[in-house]
C-alpha cells in the first residue's frame, strides 16, 4: 500500500473517532451555536480548580408561612386583574388596616413613557398599613373619603427604589378612592384566576398556595445552585474569553428584548458565558457531555403527548438545538456538583 494512501486512511480514522466520541461535540474549528464549545479546546480557554467537596454559604430556608402565602395571593390576584375586595358599603373613610381600591396616577421629572405607563392604574387594590408601594403613601390615604374627586400629594421615591428612573426623585400622585372593605380570599375567587402555563385552573385556596410553595422551593434551589456554581467557578481560571459566544448571545438577547445590551447587562452576560464555559469544561472532564441519543431522547420527552408537534415547532417553543444542549449540560453538571458538595440544603415545598 502506498505511503500517501496510508496517511489518508489514518486521517480518516482519527476524524471518525473524534466524531463518534463527542456526540454533538464534533471536531471542528468553525463556530456553530448548535454545537456549543465544539470549536474550542477548552483546556486552552479555562483551567479548572477544585470543584468537588466545597463548603458553601447557602441561603436561608424559604418562607412558607401563612403571611407569606397571603401576600403572594394578593400580588397574584393583582397581576391577573382579579379583585380580592369585599366591599363594606357602610364605610366611607379610609382607616389603617382597610383594603381599598383606588384610581392612581403618578409622575416624576424626566421619566420614560414606559415608566409613565407603570405609574397609572385605574383599578389598584392595596391594604393600608402594609406599605406595599413607597414609604408614606399609605399615610396619605388614611382619612380620605370615597369620592369621584381626586386629591394630590407629593412623596419622594427611596434612593434604592428598584426602578432607577424613579430612585430618589420627588413624585406627584393623584388618587381617587373608589371602594373600601376587606380582603376576601375564597375558593370561589381563586377559581376566577386564569390558569398558569402548563397546568389547569386552580380549584381552591390550598391549590393556589400549593402552587406558590412549589415555585418558592424551585427559586430557593436555584439560588443555592447558583451559590455552589459561583464557589466552584471561583476556583477556576479563565485564560481566554470566548468572544464568539458573546457576539452570539448579545445579538440574540438584543433581538428578543429590542434593546441594546451594554454596561452592567453586558458585564453580567460575560460572566454568565464564563460560567457556562466552566460547566462545559467540567462536563468534558467528568464525561457528562450530551450525546446524540441522549439529545434525541430528551426531544422525544418534550414532544410526549403532542405527536403532531414538528421539530421546528418544538424548537420554536423550547429554543434552538444549541440552547437545549446548553440547558441539558448545565443540568447534568449541577446534579454532579450537588452530589459532590458538602451540605447542599434540601428544600421541600410541603
Image: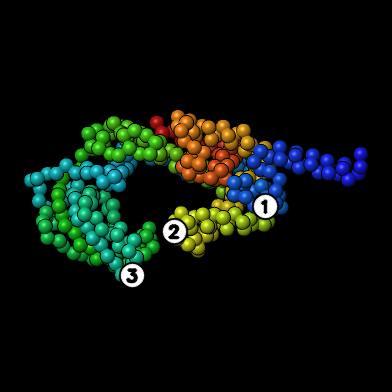
Indicate the quadrant where residue 198 lies. top left
Count neighbours of disc 3 (C-alpha within 10 A) and say few if under 14, some if 14 to 19, many if 20 or more. Answer: few
Residue for badge 1? 30
Residue for badge 3? 110
Q: Nearer the viewer, mark 3 or mark 1?
A: 1
User: What residue lies at 11% left-to-right and 54% top-to-bottom?
Assistant: 146
**Mark 2 or mark 3: whose residue is earlier in sequence:** 3
State if disc 3 and disc 2 touch (CB < 8 Å). Answer: no
Quick one: 296 or 92, which is closer to the camera?
A: 296
User: What residue lies at 47% left-to-right and 31% top-to-bottom?
Assistant: 307
Q: Helix, strand, or loop for circle 1?
A: loop
Q: Is residue 98 above or below residue 209?
A: below
**Mark 2 or mark 1: whose residue is earlier in sequence:** 1
The answer for how far apart the CA atoms under marks 2 and 1 are is 28 Å
Quick one: 253 or 133, which is closer to the camera?
A: 253
Residue 144 as seen in the image, left or right of residue 188: left
> Horizontal and vertical percent for residue 158?
34, 62
Indicate the quadrant where residue 60 lies. top left
Q: Helix, strand, or loop for circle 3?
A: loop
Q: Is residue 337 visible?
A: no
Q: Which residue is the extreme one toward the bottom?
A: 110
| Quadrant of the drawing holding the C terminus | top left
**Mark 3 or mark 1: whose residue is earlier in sequence:** 1
> Horizontal and vertical percent for residue 259?
45, 60
Q: Which mark is residue 167?
A: none
Q: Is residue 236 above or below residue 338?
A: below
The answer for how far apart the CA atoms under marks 3 and 1 are is 47 Å
Q: Nearer the viewer, mark 2 or mark 3?
A: 2
> Horizontal and vertical percent for residue 308?
46, 33
State if disc 1 and disc 2 touch (CB < 8 Å). Answer: no
Q: Which mark is residue 258?
A: 2
Amino acid at each position: 500500500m502506498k505511503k500517501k494512501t496510508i496517511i489518508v486512511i489514518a486521517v480518516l480514522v482519527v476524524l471518525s473517532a473524534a466524531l463518534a466520541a463527542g456526540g454533538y461535540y464534533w471536531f471542528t474549528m468553525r463556530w456553530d451555536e448548535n454545537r456549543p464549545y465544539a470549536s474550542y479546546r477548552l483546556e486552552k480557554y479555562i483551567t479548572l480548580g477544585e470543584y468537588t467537596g466545597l463548603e458553601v454559604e447557602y441561603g436561608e430556608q424559604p418562607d412558607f408561612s401563612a403571611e407569606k402565602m397571603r401576600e403572594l395571593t394578593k400580588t397574584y390576584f393583582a397581576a391577573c386583574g382579579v379583585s380580592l375586595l369585599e366591599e363594606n358599603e357602610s364605610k366611607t373613610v379610609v382607616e389603617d388596616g382597610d383594603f381599598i381600591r383606588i384610581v392612581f396616577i403618578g409622575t416624576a421629572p424626566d421619566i420614560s413613557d414606559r415608566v409613565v405607563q407603570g405609574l397609572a392604574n385605574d383599578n389598584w387594590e392595596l391594604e393600608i398599613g402594609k406599605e406595599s408601594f413607597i414609604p408614606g403613601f399609605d399615610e396619605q390615604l388614611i382619612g380620605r373619603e370615597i369620592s369621584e374627586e381626586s386629591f394630590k400629594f407629593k412623596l419622594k421615591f427611596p434612593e434604592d427604589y428598584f426602578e432607577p428612573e424613579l430612585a430618589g426623585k420627588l413624585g406627584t400622585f393623584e388618587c381617587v378612592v373608589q371602594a373600601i372593605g376587606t380582603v376576601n380570599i375564597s375558593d370561589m375567587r381563586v377559581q376566577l384566576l386564569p390558569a398558569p402555563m402548563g397546568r389547569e385552573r386552580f380549584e381552591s385556596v390550598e391549590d393556589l398556595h400549593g402552587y406558590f410553595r412549589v415555585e418558592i422551593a424551585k427559586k430557593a434551589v436555584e439560588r443555592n445552585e447558583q451559590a455552589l456554581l459561583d464557589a466552584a467557578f471561583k476556583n477556576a481560571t479563565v485564560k481566554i474569553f470566548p468572544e464568539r459566544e458573546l457576539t452570539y448571545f448579545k445579538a440574540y438577547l438584543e433581538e428578543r428584548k429590542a434593546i441594546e445590551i451594554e454596561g452592567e447587562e453586558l458585564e453580567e452576560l460575560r460572566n454568565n458565558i464564563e460560567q457556562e464555559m466552566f460547566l462545559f469544561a467540567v462536563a468534558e472532564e467528568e464525561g457528562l457531555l450530551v450525546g446524540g441519543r441522549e439529545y434525541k431522547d430528551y426531544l422525544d420527552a418534550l414532544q410526549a403527548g403532542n405527536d403532531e408537534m414538528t421539530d421546528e415547532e418544538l424548537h420554536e417553543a423550547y429554543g434552538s438545538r444549541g440552547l437545549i444542549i446548553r440547558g441539558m449540560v448545565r443540568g447534568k453538571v449541577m446534579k454532579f456538583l450537588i452530589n459532590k458538595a458538602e451540605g447542599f440544603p434540601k428544600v421541600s415545598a410541603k
